[in-house]
Amino acid sequence: MADRDAIADPVIRRAVASLLATGVVDGLYLAGSHGTGQADAFSDIDLVAVAAPDAHGAVADAWQTALAAEVEVVHWDRQSRWGTLVNAITVAWTRVDLFVVQDLRGRAQDALRPVHDRDGLWADLPPKTGAKHPDPAQITRTATEAIRILGLLPQYRVTHSCRPMPRGRRPRMRMAS
């Protein structure tokens, strides 16, 4: 059932192949919008890797090495809580997140697409994700991440007057100083 071609981006697919060649990953799955089949041109690529807890650092290191060998990465972030999360933004603005966990607890088949499933973990998952309720901590993390991403964009200041704009005209914009 595992399908390495499930990753559409050829650069990321090569980096994944390099990561899997190291043998440090027990399972690797597409998650997020790519995992559910709802991705669009602006979707980031979310990967979930399963590895023993004492191998999380090695998996993260191997991923950073594999990805950097394929493409210039302009932003790295690495966090450890409930596993190890590695965020990367490439020079082409491809956003890739690798979350390394010890198991797939709390996940379901409809939210993951197997890329490498050595131990058949995906088959043991429930078919559908249960109903979720808003998690205030997750909302805070998501808002913080959105603000962080906005901070990477160029900043503009819009100048406008109280007069109505003629139809078809935009406010003047200039770089903030």
Image (cartoon, grey):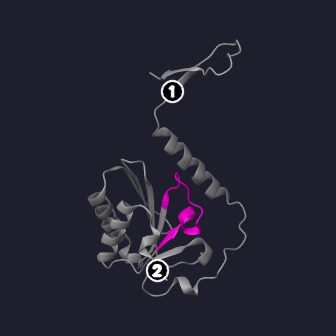
Place residue 126 in its image quadrant.
bottom right
> What residue do we see at 73% from left, 70% from top?
131
Mark 2: few/some/many CA within 10 Å (<14, 14-19, 20+) = some
Q: What is the quadrant of the C terminus in the image?
A: top left
Would you say the residues marked 2 and 1 are in contact, meaning their CB atoms lie under 8 Å apart?
no
Vertical placement of 167 versus 120: above or below?
above
Vertical placement of 76 versus 149: above or below?
below
Vertical placement of 157 versus 50: above or below?
above
Going by the image, does 136 lie left or right of 148?
right
Given residues 24 and 160, the one toward you in this image is 160
Vertical placement of 128 versus 42: above or below?
below
Which label's residue is closer to the chain start, 2 or 1?
2
> What residue do we see at 57% from left, 62% from top?
33
Which x, y percent locates residue 69? Answer: 26, 60
Which x, y percent locates residue 5? Answer: 43, 71
Going by the image, does 40 lie left or right of 84?
right
Mark 1: few/some/many CA within 10 Å (<14, 14-19, 20+) = few
Q: Is residue 126 magenta?
A: no
Question: Mark 1: which amino acid?
Answer: Tyr
Residue hosting label 2:
2
* Helix, strand or loop for disc 1: strand
Given residues 123 and 147, the one toward you in this image is 123
Camera sees residue 176? yes
Going by the image, does 138 lie left or right of 83?
right
> What residue do we see at 58% from left, 66% from top?
37
Q: Is residue 41 magenta?
A: yes
Place residue 20 in its image quadrant.
bottom left
* Helix, strand or loop for disc 2: loop
> What residue do we see at 64% from left, 81% from top?
127
Which residues are drawn in magenta? 29-45
Question: Mark 2: which amino acid?
Answer: Ala
Residue hosting label 1:
156
